[in-house]
Amino acid sequence: MRLLFVGNSLTYYNGGLENHVRLLAASATPPRILVADRATQGGATLRVLHGLPSVHERIQQGHYDRVILQDDIPELTEHSITAFEEYARRFDQEIRSHGGRSVLFMAWPYERLGWISLEQIAIAHRTLGVELNAPVAPVGLAFHRSLEARPQLAMLGKDREHETVHGTYLAACVHYATLFGVSPEGLPYRPDGVSADEATFLQSIAWQTVQAWSR
């Protein structure tokens, strides 16, 4: 499977989400072999990314099976989800025309730009996912579920915006479960800084969240 992650620093933080998903998949038995690339720019929304020729070149020439679209809805200065919907639709049309399928990466709200809640972000992704017939990786909801169970295990770093390594690992597990429709539980890959116990916990949270979203 060939993957392209399109997003901003929420995608490329901690060494790149695409690399963690690739390593997680490679640790399965038998290994799931992925080619995983990214087309990202710090602070960019899907509207900004849609204006970058390099992103379109990747989509049009990379022969990707799945293109994961990560918008940063809190960054939309007009305080409306309209641009998220418009540019996700535009990207989806382009992705489909080149033989791929979109996946929506649901991110999370944060304190610096607090005009939208996690519930509103989830509803926006649910609605658009149904419209586009596109799977949703409910990462923001997984963060919330993890914090409810283990509040001492931070999902966001000191800036309260970007992920800790635990947050990135949980995001990778959610994407793995979304892409393959199977649990990441038991996979041996874990990045430096994530203990075996923490990996087991985060894998379980990812699978619970993806199953609940699917229901």
Image (spheres, rainbow, N blue to C red):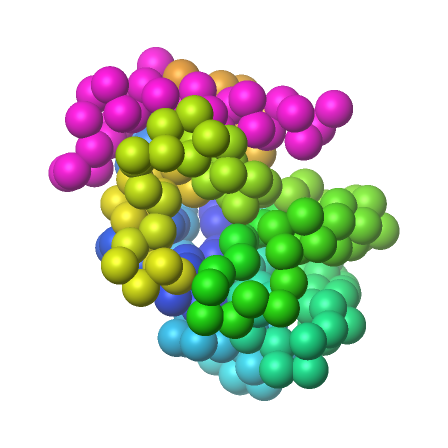
Query: Does the rendering let one see residue 86?
Result: no
Nearest the viewer among 45 and 75 is: 75
Q: Residue furthest right?
A: 131
Q: Is residue 174 found left or right of 47 in the rendered image?
A: left
Please tell me in which quadrant of the rendered image residue 27 appears.
top left
| x and y, in percent, of residue 185 in the image | 40, 17
| x and y, in percent, of residue 129 in the image | 75, 48
Q: Which residues are magenta?
A: 186-215
What residue appears at the point 29 percent right and 25 percent down from the top-left corner? 199
What residue appears at the point 57 percent right and 34 percent down from the top-left corner? 178
| x and y, in percent, of residue 110 in the image | 48, 61
Q: Is residue 21 found left or right of 207 in the rendered image?
A: left
Compared to residue 50, the image places residue 119 above or below, namely above
Q: Residue furthest left?
A: 192
Nearest the viewer among 205 and 214 is: 205
| x and y, in percent, of residue 18 in the image | 38, 50
What residue appears at the point 73 percent right and 68 percent down from the top-left corner? 81
Q: Quadrant of the C terminus?
A: top right
Name the main secondary structure of what is drawn in magenta. Answer: helix
Residue 191 is covered by the magenta coloring: yes
The number of numbered badges drawn on the structure is 0
Nearest the viewer among 53 and 144 is: 144
Compared to residue 79, the image places residue 162 above or below, namely above
Q: Is residue 66 found left or right of 15 in the rendered image?
A: right
Query: Does the rendering let one see residue 152?
Result: yes
What residue appears at the point 18 percent right and 26 percent down from the top-left corner? 195
Compared to residue 50, the image places residue 88 above or below, namely above
Residue 60 is covered by the magenta coloring: no
